[in-house]
Amino acid sequence: MSSLLQGVNLYLIGMMGVGKTTVGPLLAKHLGYGFLDLDGVIAKATDKSINQLFAEEGEAGFRQIESDVLSQVCAFTKLTIATGGGIVLRRENWGYLHHGLIVWLDVPVELIYRRLAEDTTRPLLQDADLKGKLRSLLEQRTPLYSQADLHITVQEGETPEDIANRIIEVIPNVLKPQASH
């Protein structure tokens, strides 16, 4: 598999709470890749939590920082990168993402809701109607997420290992082997 990927990064996209940060390290291990959580890199680089950045910079300011960090991260190879749910909102980010293989983890809203119902660390979810907010965000982002190279629909009860294995199984379907000379 690694020879087929030839060091190309894997970018995991999808709504918050779909499991990108959980599945990512499993994929990375299987591929012999490193793993980065983009939000973690942003927090470390700025010495601020994502919540702090949203509060101080606003969403637009955060998205600019996110794009700047993504532009630097995409220069590396052999990485599996869990992105933030809104990474797809800026056109410039697609230029960076397309340097790698983009995998959309698609999870039903009901399941995301159950996963995030008690999570107070997500700045975009500080809303009285959490389920409505999730539906709205997903509706807005689905056309963007659907531009991914791979679309993995996650089912209730699937383990992170199951999901990682499914991704590994379908990667060859979207990669063309290099012609040998």
Image (cartoon, helix red, strand yellow):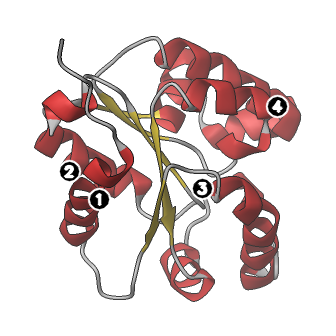
* Residue designated by label 3: 121
Of the numbered discs in the image, which one, if any, rests on residue 56?
4
Q: Identify the secondary structure beneath mark 3.
A: loop
**Horizontal and vertical percent position of residue 66:** 66, 28
Residue at mark 2 to residue at mark 1: CA–CA distance? 15 Å
Q: Nearer the viewer, mark 3 or mark 2?
A: 2
Report how far apart the C-alphas of labels 2 and 4 lie in the structure.
Answer: 34 Å
Residue 136: image quadrant is bottom right
Give the CA distance from mark 3 to mark 2: 24 Å
Q: Nearer the viewer, residue 20 or 55?
A: 20
Residue picked out by circle 2: 26
Q: Position of residue 161 (x, y in %)?
A: 19, 65
Marks 3 and 4, how far apart in space? 15 Å
Q: Which residue is mark 1?
A: 170
Q: CA distance from mark 4 to mark 1?
A: 41 Å
Task: Report which quarter residue 98 is drawn in.
Answer: top right
Count of labels shown? 4
Please provide percent x and percent y for residue 34. Answer: 24, 28
